[in-house]
Image (cartoon, rainbow, N blue to C red):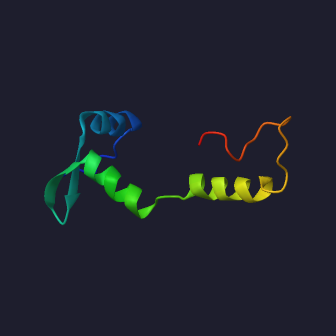
Amino acid sequence: MSDHIPTLADVCSAIAEGRLVAASDGSMYQVSAFELRRHFNKRHALPTISFLEEMLSSACSDTRDSTHLDLCSFGR
């Protein structure tokens, strides 16, 4: 494989097609972009939604006022 550095367009095209070509130790491999995304999603899953929900529920638990938007139950 050459020392070609892929452009952003190359990467976007490969992701859109669902496959990426990778080289390691002189061998070429075809990697599924969907499997790669699934792998990284498992390793880097951020608990932002549950963290935000927990933070809002504890902040709003003492201030239930029907005249204000109830952020604690919004979306449930």
Left or right of 75: which side holds 27? Answer: left
Q: Where residue 6 appears, x then y in whole percent?
A: 34, 43
Q: Where residue 25 appears, x then y in whole percent?
A: 18, 66
Residue visible at 62% across and 58% down? 51
The residue closer to the viewer here, 19 or 1, is 19
Q: How many marks?
A: 0
Q: Where residue 55 appears, x then y in whole percent?
A: 71, 58
**Which quadrant holds residue 28?**
bottom left
Residue visible at 83% across and 38% down? 66
Left or right of 40: which side holds 35? Answer: left
Residue visible at 66% across and 40% down? 74
The residue closer to the viewer here, 27 or 70, is 70
Seen as rendered, the residue at the extreme left is 27
Q: Is residue 71 above or below residue 31?
A: above
Q: Is residue 42 above or below residue 6?
A: below
Residue visible at 25% across and 39% down? 18
Position of the C terminus by quadrant: top right
Seen as rendered, the residue at the extreme bottom is 25
**Which quadrant holds residue 71?**
top right
Left or right of 73: which side holds 24? Answer: left
